Image (tube, coloured by chain):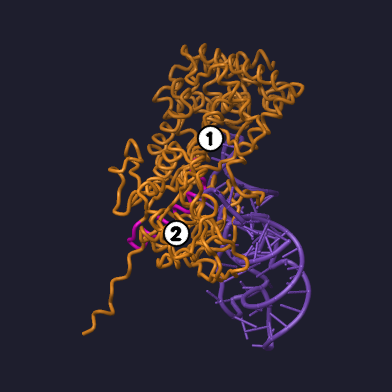
Amino acid sequence: MTGQTDKPPAPIVTRFAPSPTGNLHIGGARTALFAWAFARKHGGQLILRIEDTDLARSTPESTKGILRDLKWLGLDWDQGPNPEADDPYDLESQKGDHGPYFQSQRHEQGIYDKLIQKLLDLGLAYEDEDAVRFRMDKDIAFNDVVYGPIEVKAADLEDFIIRKGDKGGRLPTFHFAVTVDDALMEVTHVIRGQEHLTNTSKHAALCDALGFNRPQWVHLPSIMNADGSKMSKRDKVKAARKAAQRIALDYDGSIERAVLALWGAWQSASAIHLDMYGEPNPIEHEETEFISAYQRFLIDKEDNAISLADLDILATVLPVIKPPEIEVDDFRHYGYLPNITLSYIALLGWNPGDDIERFDLNFLIDNFDLTRIGKKNSQFDRTKLAKFNAEALAEMTSERFIELLSKHFIEFHREFINKLGEIGFQTFATAYQARSQTLNTPAELGRFFVCADDEIEYNAKAVKKNLAKNEGEGLNVLQQFRGELDACVDWTADTLHSLIESFVEKHQLKNMGSVAQPLRVALTGNAVSPEIGPTLELLGKEAVLKRIDRCVETCG
RNA sequence: GCCCCCAUCGUCUAGUGGCCCAGGACGCCAGGUUCUCAUCCUGGAAACAGGGGUUCGACUCCCCUUGGGGGUACCA
């Protein structure tokens, strides 16, 4: 009996190894997702390792941000920093037997220096001023699971730095640290972005020199912008700056005057808020804070990415700024659901092989397969994501939708909750569920629910079509129906709906729209709102009558 | 410049020599349902980058061109 041949298969170990130089990018999220799905599919392990060997750019805040973003997405890991720990750097709290999981800490433990010395002793590396270089003098061939066999000739290779000099704190470079850590942590599958494909020859050579087994390399095609350019956080700055410059140009190109005008707008908006709610605007800014945020993003330095906090400050008075979603946190901000975002990005470069596109994470785990990863870069299609998101929002129970929406609004659109109250907010949520692409949609479309009654601006086209046409037919209906509303004692959606129905019948009007449309213009300034019943109920009798009177006065 | 990689509807993709006058999804267009918007239903337009080979037969294999991406850092 030779049971020996039936060795248990080697456990799969994957890792996600971001460098903490900013928030988690949507491309990074997909890399993490694939590493996660592959490990889960095979009952293996996922390691989270923080590659903070760039002293100048790495920050603890970025590490925390990445942990937060992964948590929001719902991705977990078996080894690495503990997301629940107050200080993720704390050695005691890190999970796993192959720690520490921060490269800066591994460096402090001498892990890299010991192996660099070994290479030096073997004559495979040499000192170059205060740095150390590795000799690349042989042809290198390796296999990539996605891209197949790759060969690089020695002539095209150069000796490269494996340990930085004093300037870089004598830390190992990325190439050295990844190779060593992947081997020491017993990683079997290195899943990462395609930008590392060419450099993999360095890692293969290093593995050989150090006597490590080479892992399986799995390089993923890149995710690009809709115009085919590389998707990067700079896009956000570009969009914001463009909008800001457009505004500045409206003020004779004088930035100082644009800033003053914006600040004025901000202050009057705050005053209105105080007037409406009897309490100060929950988002408060100092004048200096506001101006410096504005100036920071006008500075023409693309690497200097604007912070989300700065954007928030500006976005409160610059509704025109809607930067493209690039980072995971942006998607949260704009109200996309984490699981939908994940299943959508899974489709960028991977598919289950049949026509199934709507699937959940369990389906992904069951069906994920490295051989079905494509080679072509793909462009990120926000419209398609939005559609998937809208479907998910529409399908869920209204209880669930209310729960998610109120969570989102407490964080980002507090004023709606303050104004509508708990019960009103539920009605509001239900009214918008089927109309929402994201959790932000109700805030965008339902602005009129929270603005002051005398703040409604009447859209000329809507007025013409629904009020003025046929010698003021709509206006007449509006005035007549106002009497019915004034007399209404049971101010609920159902009653109000019936009220319109019987009014239509009594006056032999064409349909509900004959009343609902003039009402919409009076209440919202436009011809669009949720169903008229709930809209009336939410606004309340007093506001409805006030708005009708003002509309008749203004448009009559 | 040099090196590596990639190439099917606008976009994400299915397709591994005959099942393909190329299928699905998002978007788009037209019509229908509807109090507006959205949803929903029905239908439609829309692609194998170009040129050479190989083969009885190429979207599928090979070569070239073109286009795109990446690398060429004491960034990762």
| Chain B as rendered: colour | purple
As drawn, is A105 to the left or to the right of A161?
A: left
Question: In 3D space, how far apart are the residues under numbered discs 1 and 2 (Cα atoms)?
Answer: 46 Å
Q: How many marks?
A: 2
Mark seen at residue A441: 1
Front-most of residues A75 and B75 = B75
Above or below A133: residue B37: above
> SS for tag 1?
helix
**Magenta part of the chain:** A22-45
Chain in orange in the render: A
Q: Which residue is mark 2?
A: A179
Quarter of the image holding residue A104? top left
**Image x and y of residue A498, in percent:** 49, 27
Quarter of the image holding residue B61? bottom right
Front-most of residues A363 and A96 = A96
**Image x and y of residue A53, in percent:** 46, 46
Q: Amino acid at mark 2?
A: Thr
